Image (cartoon, rainbow, N blue to C red):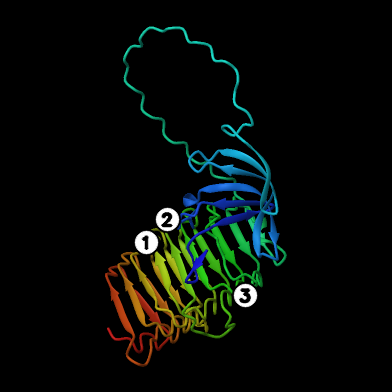
Amino acid sequence: MWKGNKLVEIIRKIEGSIMIEFKRSGNNTTASNRIPLYVGEFVYDESKESFLRNGRGYWIDEETRIATREVEWKDGVEVSGRDLYDGWYTRSTTPKPKPKPKPAPMLVPAPAPAPAPKREEPAPLRFSVTGSTKWTDVSLQVTDLKISSNCCNDLNALDLNRFEWLRSIEIGDECFGSVKTFQIDGLNRLKTIKIGSNSFTQKKNDDGDDKLKSFHILNCESLESIQIGEYSFSDFGGDFELKNLPQLQSIQIGTFGSQSCNFWCSSFVVRDLPNLQSITLGNEAFRESLSTIMENLPSLQSIQLGYGTLKGRWDDSSSLIMRNLPNLTSITSAGDSFYYPRV
């Protein structure tokens, strides 16, 4: 479910021939918040433009996560079913013997509770998406995801947060041209994000200003680097947000010395990233940034800005804040950076 062009709730998920329906909680975009209520086969009814239960399925108890009923469906109508007991078809009918009386046990200290078992990390699984690949074919266990160039331009939404084991994401050139919101949230194993040129934009080799398009990378505790090629996100004019990325070391958006135009009309706000060491922005990236803020970056050492980068707007509405950068030793600009902002 989308609200204001932002994913706010996941109602169902399709995995091959199986549909999983989740409890409507209002906040389940991260995997840990999703509570399955129904798992089973389905059919898509084009006349109703909806997914219908069709075939065998199971009701799931939201507390125990155990199946409570097995049901046969036909075009969304229940035709037969049987109750399950702790996931089994029948109750146990074996009589229990009466226990013999036992002497009162000696009082001993209760043992400490055993620690919760750790989830086992899956073996490395690399998956490449090409023009003929369906997103439903991508395993939820994927650790390294690569999108070939010129892919997925028919999609208007992208959900990467369901791949909780991801360590790296690599997206080629000219991909996801119709996607309006880029959001990665809570992928705690993710270390690198690399995106090629002219992706996530409908203005190839050009710039634009669509305030409904926004970019968010949040709550990724292992992320170390973000690299974005020339002209990608060139017509994104909405929010640009980097938050709670404690291991992020480098940001490279565009190519220094080459025309890039990334996030042409977005504000560039980077703050509270304790391990960030370098920022590189290509020519005319964030060119008309209204609010440019770089603060509370204790490890930042170098900033490279291409020509016209962070230039601001001519009408004196732009502002610039740079503070608490104790290790910054180098700022390089090809020219016309910080031209209009008022400090």
Relative horizontal placement of residue 173, taking residue 105 as reference (left or right): right
- Figure quadrant of residue 198: bottom right
How many circles with numbers are drawn on the protein? 3
- Figure quadrant of residue 288: bottom left
Give how far apart the Cα atoms at labels 2 and 1 are: 12 Å
* Of pointers 2 and 1, the one earlier in the residue sequence: 2
Relative horizontal placement of residue 188, taking residue 273 as reference (left or right): right
Which element carries disc 1, helix, strand or loop?
A: loop
- Label 2 sits on residue: 221
* Of pointers 2 and 3, the one earlier in the residue sequence: 3
Q: Residues within 10 Å of mark 2 (few under 14, many from 20)?
A: some
Residue at (49% x, 76% y) in the render: 213
Q: How crowded is mark 1: few (under 14 residues within 10 Å), some or many (20 or more)?
A: some
Task: State the residue in front, 191 or 255.
Answer: 191
Q: What residue type is labelled 2?
A: Glu
- Label 3 sits on residue: 174
Relative horizontal placement of residue 325, taking residue 12 as reference (left or right): left
Which element carries disc 2, helix, strand or loop?
A: loop
Relative horizontal placement of residue 151, taking residue 293 as reference (left or right): right
Q: What residue type is labelled 3?
A: Glu
- Figure quadrant of residue 322: bottom left
x, y percentage for residue 103? 38, 7
Give how far apart the Cα atoms at labels 2 and 3 are: 29 Å
Please say if 194 is above or below 282. Answer: above
Which element carries disc 3, helix, strand or loop?
A: loop
- Label 1 sits on residue: 275
Q: Which amino acid does label 1 sit on?
A: Asn
Residue at (63% x, 55% y) in the render: 14
* Of pointers 1 and 3, the one earlier in the residue sequence: 3
Q: Which of marks 1 and 3 is in front?
A: 3
